[in-house]
């Protein structure tokens, strides 16, 4: 379960970086 939370967190960070650009 921890892996799923980490994966979702990493995906959100990538989305934030794309929106920031």
Image: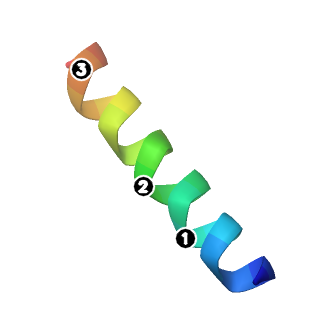
In percent of the image, x 62 and y 77: which residue is there? 4
Q: Quadrant of the C terminus?
A: top left
Say which mark, if any, is on residue 11.
Answer: 2
How many numbered circles does the render carry?
Answer: 3
Q: Position of residue 6 (x, y in %)?
A: 67, 68
The kind of secondary structure element at disc 2 is helix
In the image, residue 17 sits, relative to residue 6, either above or below, namely above
C-alpha distance separating marks 3 and 1:
18 Å
The residue positioned farthest toward the right in the image shown: 2
Q: On the image, which quarter does residue 3 sit in?
A: bottom right
Please give left or right for residue 15 compared with residue 5 in the image: left
Q: Which residue is mark 3?
A: 19
- Do the residues bearing badges 2 and 1 touch, measured as CB atoms within 8 Å? yes
In percent of the image, x 76 and y 84: which residue is there? 1
Q: Which residue is mark 1?
A: 7
Please give left or right for residue 8 compared with residue 17 in the image: right
How crowded is the residue under tag 3: few (<14 C-alpha within 10 Å), some, or many (20+)? Answer: few
């Amino acid at each position: 379960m921890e892996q799923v939370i980490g994966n979702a967190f990493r995906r959100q960070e990538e989305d934030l970086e794309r929106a920031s650009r």
